[in-house]
Amino acid sequence: MEKAFDEELYDFWAKLPSEILSLIQTYITRERDYNILRFICKSWRCISVLHRQSPFPIDYLSLRSPLLMSSQGSRYNFFHPLHHTYYMQFPELSEDKIIYSKDGWLLIISGTVREEKQTFFFNSLTKMRIDLPILPYYCRFAKFSFSGLPTSKDYVVVGIQNYSIYVDIGVIKFGMDNWQIHEISLEENEITCWERFHVFSNPVIVDGCCYCLDVNGKVGIFDPNDVINSWKIVRKTLWRLRWSRDLLFQNFMVESDGELLAIFLTNDGRVYVYKLDELKLDWIKVKDLKEKVIYLSNASSWVEKGINSKNKIYFPLLYDDKALVFYSLSTRRYHSNGYDFSRNNFYDMKYLPHSSWIKIM
């Protein structure tokens, strides 16, 4: 009787879902315990887990920091701001592209330019997938964003693409069978010369409104529930931030405690941070982030209070192909943890355009 009970108990543990096993292993802090976990039984050795490539132990505090996720086919590298490097295999994402991420969820798109495209949510820890309606072939949205958890009934996904004389905006919400596609014609004074409205970063959704930053600092604003009637452009920013396209490398927009921040990165490595004054509809230069740290990438960006650091901006930049690079607003220079260097540009550093910040805890 006792033997039968032991076999039943063993069978119970051997059939634990891989999602639970993957979650358990993130709490292990010692290499010895990690190896013991994997040798419990055959099924536990087959789970897709995070493999460490550095001698540093995983601890709870370091896991609270975001990881920069970058793909190489079905293999994804995870770069920790301080010291760890991880990798994980995602065969189900081998030919897909991450277009946005938030709260541990990835927004994925698959399909070529000339065919209908499948969009779906994917949880990098549990591998849960939630399909969205097919995106028509004529929709070529370059930038995306979503608000709300994909598992809730109040999520909203927004896609945007601008052309010379109009802007296309797509919206999908819970319960909708098809994307809502809106075409907005730009006014004549919005498309003059190089100053026309040109979105260069992902939109940001705050309190039900969507904000889109263009290369010159102008902001397009609309309500996803009433795109056509609510669309407007904040024009006063244009004359304060007159960037040349040859000078601008990338810009980003993030929300911080209800305020909008714009970050401009130039080709020669200069960094400019501005805060939007919604009353005056103008930008205010920011020289100090105080206790905050900004994490930026083409697929996701956000601001949070620093755990072990402050007043920094992490870009999707690598030094020596393995160490994340940050820009300090205190020194106005680039640095990297673990390497003793200080530069005023990002020459000889690797920029990861197809990367995304995620949090696994």
Image (spheres, grey):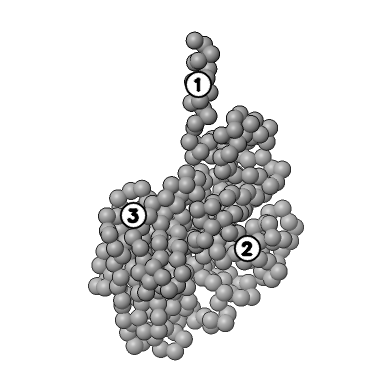
Give the left or right position of residue 350, taking residue 47 as reference: right
Identify the mark nearer the N-term, 1 or 2: 1
The residue identified by callout 2 is 317
Amino acid type of the residue tagged 2 in the rendering: Leu
Amino acid type of the residue tagged 3 in the rendering: Tyr
Of the numbered discs in the image, which one, if any, rests on residue 9?
Answer: 1
Residue 100 screen position, x and y as percent: 46, 60
Residue lying at the far right in this picture: please name it.
Answer: 340
The residue identified by callout 3 is 155
For the point 60% across and 64% down, which residue is it? 352
Foreground residue among 31 and 10: 10
Residue 288 screen position, x and y as percent: 55, 61
Of the numbered discs in the image, which one, if any, rests on residue 278?
Answer: none
Q: Quadrant of residue 315?
A: bottom right
For the point 51% across and 65% down, which residue is it? 298
Amino acid type of the residue tagged 1 in the rendering: Leu
Q: At numbered mark 1, what does the secondary structure look like: helix, strand or loop? A: helix
For the point 75% across and 57% down, which residue is it? 340
Residue 83 seen in the figure: yes
For the point 30% across and 58% down, which residue is it? 173
Identify the mark nearer the N-term, 3 or 1: 1
Residue 124 screen position, x and y as percent: 50, 49
Residue lying at the far top in this picture: please name it.
Answer: 1
Q: Is residue 325 above or below residue 164?
A: above
Give the left or right position of residue 237, taking residue 272 as reference: left
| Residues marked 3 and 1 touching at CB (< 8 Å) | no
Residue 45 screen position, x and y as percent: 60, 36
